[in-house]
């Protein structure tokens, strides 16, 4: 997606945006009942007094204010729990939770509907038909509140829990991996070996700010490449940390003159930089956050090996998706042939996923067994590079475990799994023979 589409997507994830939208709808509904009655040609049966409608609106306004305040305190508590028990990096996913945002927006919109309805009712703007319409709308708002409350009660039982937050991180990581499986180079031409493929006379375009790359508008880079009539080679992928003079791209073309200056501005504008990394285009960040959850669970203050084992299983599931789905060259569409982007390296993904948990769980045999079984299983699928990356992490985890495990029987149990590694190596040798 383009940079503006991505910024709009980030805007719609904000709580204030959805709350403002639903709140405006509540105000509009209350005012509409006073305006629309003059356009209704028929007479609505029944006579509803102002006192009856006002009493209901007063109940809605007072109760929704209390419920909204209570819900905000619950949200704050859930965010604090996720920060201390899971990882601060996962809190962003809770803040962007659609169910929570919809619930709070509904409560706020109902409160504003009640307040505005009372104010307009006091002014005498509602006639007989207007009060009837307002009453019908109020009944609809009550039904919406009841459904939202039931949904909110069910959602509160899981909000901020370790398992629920881990589910969110896994889902976000899976979405990013599926994007990179479908578009390994984000629609650009693949840059397999930067040291060889980038021309020696290509000019670097340095960054002018400090932070992490959250999003790259490949289409904007392609337009800049057309402007300078040359190729652009990406040097700072999504997730990279930038500081002044960090090369964003290398340009094989002229960047002199007015057109060159416009192209440089467009290149820098294609990079969205922030103080934090984002899950959207960065599956490595998702895997790193998963690893952080396991690492925190293994800390002495929490001492929860079960969560670490659960994270290893989830990570194995994610990397299996990557290993089995990433090598589909016939389905890759190159939309921007003048922009060159390096695909994700398998070794980097495995390091992000397993390095922390293997280090912090080096002295726990139950964690090491699960890590070794997972890595040896992953070593039997995917490409040669994928298998080598899995075996490399398996060797590193075993080396850490041998230094930390005091009981010889535990070290022997890990060593006994080498037969499974040998089978993985035989599979790899068989593939090379074919």
Image (spheres, rainbow, N blue to C red):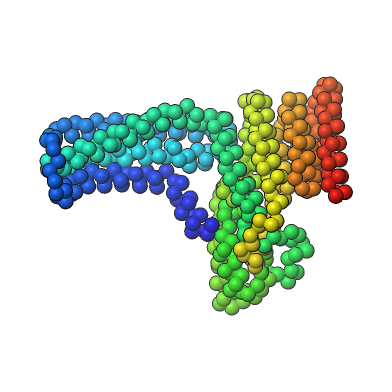
Which quadrant would residue 422 be assigned to in this image?
Answer: top right
Q: Is residue 241 above or below residue 78?
A: below
* x then y, percent, for residue 126: 14, 43
In the image: residue 264, left or right of residue 25: right
> What is the quadrant of residue 289 in the picture?
top right
Quick one: which residue is furthest to the bottom in this view? 257
The residue located at (19%, 31%) in the rendering is: 55
* Count of numbered labels shown in the rendering: 0
- For the point 57% across and 35% down, the residue is 167
Residue at the spot x=45%, y=40% of the render? 98
Q: Is residue 125 above or below residue 164?
A: below
Q: Position of residue 187 (x, y in %)?
A: 62, 59
Q: Position of residue 49 (x, y in %)?
A: 12, 34
Q: What is the x, y in percent for residue 109?
A: 31, 40
Toward which corner of the image does residue 190 lie, by quadrant?
A: bottom right
**Residue sitting at x 54%, y 63%:** 269
On screen, residue 162 above or below 31: above
């Amino acid at each position: 997606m383009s940079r503006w589409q991505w910024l709009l997507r980030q805007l719609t994830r904000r709580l204030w945006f959805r709350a403002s939208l639903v709140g405006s709808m509540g105000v509009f509904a209350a005012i509409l009942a006073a305006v629309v009655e003059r356009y209704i040609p028929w007479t609505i049966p029944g006579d509803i007094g102002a006192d009856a409608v006002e009493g209901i609106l007063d109940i809605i306004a007072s109760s929704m204010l209390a419920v909204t305040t209570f819900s905000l305190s619950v949200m704050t508590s859930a965010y604090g729990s996720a920060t201390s028990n899971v990882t601060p990096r996962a809190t962003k996913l809770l803040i962007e939770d659609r169910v929570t945002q919809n619930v709070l927006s509904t409560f706020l919109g109902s409160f504003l509907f009640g307040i505005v309805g009372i104010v307009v009712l006091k002014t005498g703007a509602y006639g007989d038909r207007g009060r009837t319409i307002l009453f019908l709308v109020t009944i609809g708002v009550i039904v919406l509140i009841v459904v939202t409350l039931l949904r909110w009660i069910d959602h509160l039982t899981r909000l901020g829990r370790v398992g629920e937050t881990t589910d969110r991180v896994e889902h976000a990581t899976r979405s990013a991996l599926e994007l990179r499986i479908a578009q390994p180079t984000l629609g650009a031409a693949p840059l397999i070996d930067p040291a060889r493929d980038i021309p020696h006379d290509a000019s670097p375009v340095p960054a002018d700010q400090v932070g992490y790359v959250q999003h790259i508008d490949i289409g904007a880079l392609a337009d800049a490449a057309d402007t300078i009539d040359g190729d652009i080679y990406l040097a700072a992928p999504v997730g990279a940390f930038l500081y002044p003079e960090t090369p964003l791209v290398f340009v094989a073309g002229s960047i002199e003159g007015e057109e060159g200056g416009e192209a440089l501005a467009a290149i820098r504008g294609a990079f969205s930089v922030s103080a934090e990394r984002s899950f959207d285009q960065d599956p490595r960040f998702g895997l790193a956050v998963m690893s952080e959850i396991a690492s925190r669970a293994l800390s002495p203050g929490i001492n929860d090996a079960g969560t670490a084992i659960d994270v290893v299983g989830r990570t194995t599931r994610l990397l299996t998706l990557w290993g089995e789905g990433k090598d589909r060259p016939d389905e890759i569409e190159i939309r921007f042939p003048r922009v060159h982007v390096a695909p994700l390296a398998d070794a980097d993904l495995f390091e992000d996923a397993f390095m922390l948990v293997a280090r912090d769980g080096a002295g726990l045999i139950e964690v090491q067994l699960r890590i070794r079984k997972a890595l040896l299983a992953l070593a039997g699928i995917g490409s040669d590079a994928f298998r080598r990356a899995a075996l490399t992490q398996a060797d590193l985890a075993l080396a850490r475990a041998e230094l930390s495990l005091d009981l010889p029987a535990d070290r022997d149990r890990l060593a006994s799994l080498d037969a499974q590694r040998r089978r993985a190596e035989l599979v790899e040798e068989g593939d090379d023979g074919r």
